[in-house]
Amino acid sequence: MQIEAVRTTNHAEIKRWVKDRHGVPARILETDTPGLGPLTIYFPEAQEKPDNLEVLTWDVFLEDFENHGYRFVYQEALPDGTMSYFYRIERG
């Protein structure tokens, strides 16, 4: 059974997927441009917080998401039915 990735720009859908996995919105800080960098999702239960990661509020994350015309690509479950953590943020 192949599971397809879902593409969305729906804020509620993105927040639900992230919260279901106990994730939080974040940004990877780039050393040459402090405070700016790619959006990401951080899963505190699965990893230590890297020094170059800034946790964001949903408002800040979604504003940046919209301003850059991104879309969220994710997978709900793996072929065996277990929860998938696969996602990426890409230009729409």
Image (spheres, rainbow, N blue to C red):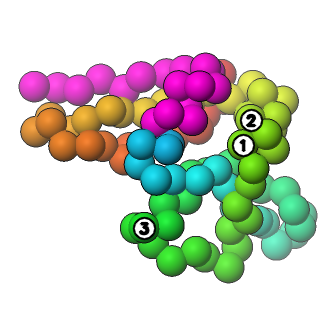
Mark 3 or mark 1: which comes first in sequence?
3
- Give me the residue at 57% from left, 35% from top: 15
> What residue would you read off at disc 3?
45
Q: Can you give x and y, in whole percent of width and height, for residue 37 in the image?
A: 77, 55
Report if residue 92 is visible in the image.
yes
Quadrant placement of the N terminus: top left
In the rendering, which numbered label is found on residue 58? Answer: 1
Mark 2 or mark 3: which comes first in sequence?
3
Look at the image and give the residue range highlighted in magenta: 1-17
In front of the other: label 2 or label 3?
3
Whether residue 3 appears in magenta in the rendering, the answer is yes
The residue lying toward the viewer, choosing from 54 and 45, is 45
* Amino acid beneath label 2: Leu
> What residue would you read off at disc 2?
62
* Amino acid beneath label 1: Trp
The residue lying toward the viewer, choosing from 34 and 57, is 57
The answer to whether marks 2 and 1 mark residues whose Cβ atoms lie closer than 8 Å is: yes
Q: Is residue 81 above or below residue 92?
A: below
- Element marked by disc 1: helix
- Give me the residue at 75% from left, 50% from top: 57
Q: Name the image quarter holding residue 4.
A: top left
Report if residue 87 is visible in the image.
no
Quadrant placement of the C terminus: top right
- Along the horizontal axis of the image, is 82 left or right of 65? left
Q: Is residue 4 above or below residue 68?
A: above
Q: How many marks?
A: 3
- Give me the residue at 25% from left, 35% from top: 77
